[in-house]
Image (cartoon, helix red, strand yellow):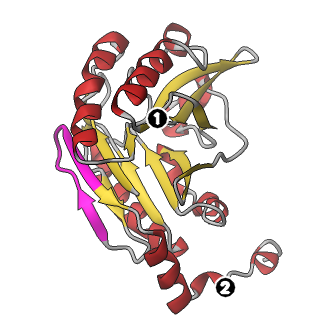
Amino acid sequence: MRIGICQTDIFFEDKERNLNAAEKYIKAVSDSKVRLALFPEMSMTGFTMKPECFYEDEKGRTYSVMAKLASKYNIYIGYGYISRKNSGYYNTYVIIDNLGKIICSYDKIHPFTYAGEDRVYEKGSSLSFCQIDDITVCPLICYDLRFPELFIKASKKADLITVAANFGGPRDGHWQVLLKARAIENQTYIAGINRAGEDVSTYYMGHSMAVSPKGDVISMAGEKEDIIIADIDKEEEYEYRKKFPVRNDFRPEIYKNL
C-alpha cells in the first residue's frame, strides 16, 4: 500500500484557509497513486489551546470537505480535528475511506502537559484500528511517541502506526530518533506526519518520515512544506519478523511485576 505524507505549513487557527489548501495536497498524492493521504495533528487549526472556538462534530465542516475530496480523488485520508464529547474536548485523529466513511477515530491518550494541553483537552483511553487493503493501520498523535508501551500494544495488531504531530523544532533530534526507535522495537512500519512553519509559540522543523520495520528511513521531508511517498509492504514486514523474531521474546507477564 502506498501512503502520502502531507507536511503542511498550517495557517494557525484559520480553518477555512487550511481547508482551501488541502486539495492541492490530495491531488498531488493521488497523482502518485497513493492509497492513504495523511495530514498532521489538528490539521486545519494548528496546535490551538482554544478548543471551544474550533471544535466540531464528527461530521462537521472538516469532515464534509475531506469526505468530498476522498470521493473525488478515490483516496483514503487521515486528518486531525478537535472533537467534543460529554462536555470535554479531545485532540482527535480520524481516517476516512475513499467513499468518505469514517473507518477509524482515535483520541490522543497523552496530552502534552509541558505545553498545558492537559488543562484544556481530555485524555483518550483506547486505541483504534482500521483495515486498508491488506494493511492494518493504527493512528497515534504527537506526544504519544514518547511512550513505548503504547506502541508495543498497537503493534500487536498494526502493520503501520501513524504519528500525526505538531512536533516543535527544538526537539527535532528526539522526533527523528524516537520514530526510528519505535519502528525497530516493534518491527513495524512507522509514519511520522509533522507540520512545517510556525505559530504563536514555536516553530516546526518538519522532517516527516516513513520508517521501515528494520528502522531504515524510507523517505523523509525537509523543513518546509513537502509531500513524501512510501510503500508499505506487509510481506516484507512479516518476513523480517520471521527472520529476526524479537517480538517472540517480549515477557509482559514479567515486566509488570518488576
How many other residues sit within 10 Å of disc 2, few (<14), some (14-19) or many (≥20)? few
Query: Residue at image x 33%, y 10%?
Result: 16
**Count of numbered tags:** 2
Q: Residue at x 51, y 36 (%)?
A: 97
Distance, label 1 to label 2, CA atoms, is: 36 Å
Q: From the viewer's perspective, is 86 left or right of 217?
A: right
Query: What residue do we see at 46% from left, 35% from top?
Result: 98
Position of 156 compared to 17: left or right? right
Q: Which residue is mark 2?
A: 248
Say above or below: 205 vs 160: above
Magenta: predominant secondary structure element?
strand
Examine the rendering and report whether any part of residue 244 can be seen. Answer: no
Residues drawn in magenta: 217-229
**In this image, 199 relative to 137: left or right?**
left
Would you say the residues marked 1 and 2 are in contact, meaning their CB atoms lie under 8 Å apart? no
Q: Quadrant of the C terminus?
A: bottom right
The label on residue 43 is: none
Residue holding disc 1: 98
Q: Earlier in the sequence, mark 1 or mark 2?
A: 1
- x then y, percent, for residue 114: 50, 39
Residue type marked 1: Asn
